[in-house]
Amino acid sequence: MESEIKSATLDDLNNIQKFNLLLLKELNKNCNQTNNCDWSLSKKGGEYFKERIIQNSGCVFIALINNKIIGYLAGSIQEKQYYRKTINSAEIDSFFVLNKFRRKYVGSQLFKTFIQWCNSKRIKRISVTTPYENIPAIKFYRKQGFADYDLILESIIK
């Protein structure tokens, strides 16, 4: 069964926050365990996704099957970085598909819709950040044409 992709509305906000919580819990389980899961359902988390839904500089797309959300992608236009000679860019801020719908082109459909949104905004460069341990996501992004650009290293000060 093919999923339907549509722009999220404020009616979808609570479900998007719940899906973001699932994302953060999955990342904490499988990756670096530094995500604050309380943020997803917090007032600030709600404001963050609300801005993406209603502002022209952001977007949230949802994937549905039988009118039930099975995934989402949130993105935004990025401010030009003063140290880079770059054209307008956007970032995938948050992206999650329920496990049983992965590898069934739902993520690809969400990504394609995001690219269409970027084209409508005359965006020529996109980026995404994911933990290095998130191998399935990295493979997905590379399949979509992403290449390594930055390497961010962290250290805990003792």
Image: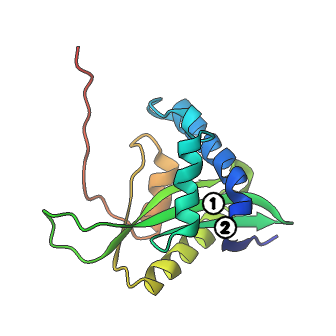
Name the disc covering residue 49, or none: none
User: How far across and down, in percent of the image, does residue 16 sit?
Assistant: 66, 53
Name the amino acid, label 1: Tyr
Which one is closest to the eye, mark 1 or mark 2? Answer: 2
For disc 2, the neighbor class at 10 Å (few under 14, some 14 to 19, many from 20) is many
Name the amino acid, label 2: Ala
Question: Which picture quadrant has residue 21?
Answer: top right
Vertical order, 29 against 1 (above or below): above
User: How far across and down, in percent of the image, does residue 62 sit?
Assistant: 67, 65
Name the disc covering residue 8, or none: 2
Q: Which of disc 2 and disc 1 is earlier in sequence?
A: 2
Q: Which residue is mark 1?
A: 72
| Image side of residue 47 versus residue 14, left or right | left
Which residue corresponds to the image point at 57% horizontal and 68% vertical from the top-left?
54
Question: Which picture quadrant has residue 42?
Answer: top right
In-front residue for pair 44/60: 44
Vertical order, 27 against 73 (above or below): above
User: How far across and down, in percent of the image, does residue 29 sit?
Assistant: 56, 31
Which residue corresponds to the image point at 24% horizontal and 54% vertical from the top-left?
150
| Alpha carbon distance from label 1 to label 2 | 9 Å
Which residue corresponds to the image point at 73% horizontal and 57% vertical from the top-left?
70
* Quadrant of the image containing the N terminus: bottom right
* Quadrant of the image containing the C terminus: top left
Q: Residue furthest right?
A: 66
| Image side of residue 107 versus residue 15, left or right | left
User: How far across and down, in percent of the image, does residue 137 sit?
Assistant: 50, 53
Discs 1, 2 touching: Cβ within 8 Å: yes
| Label 1: which secondary element | strand
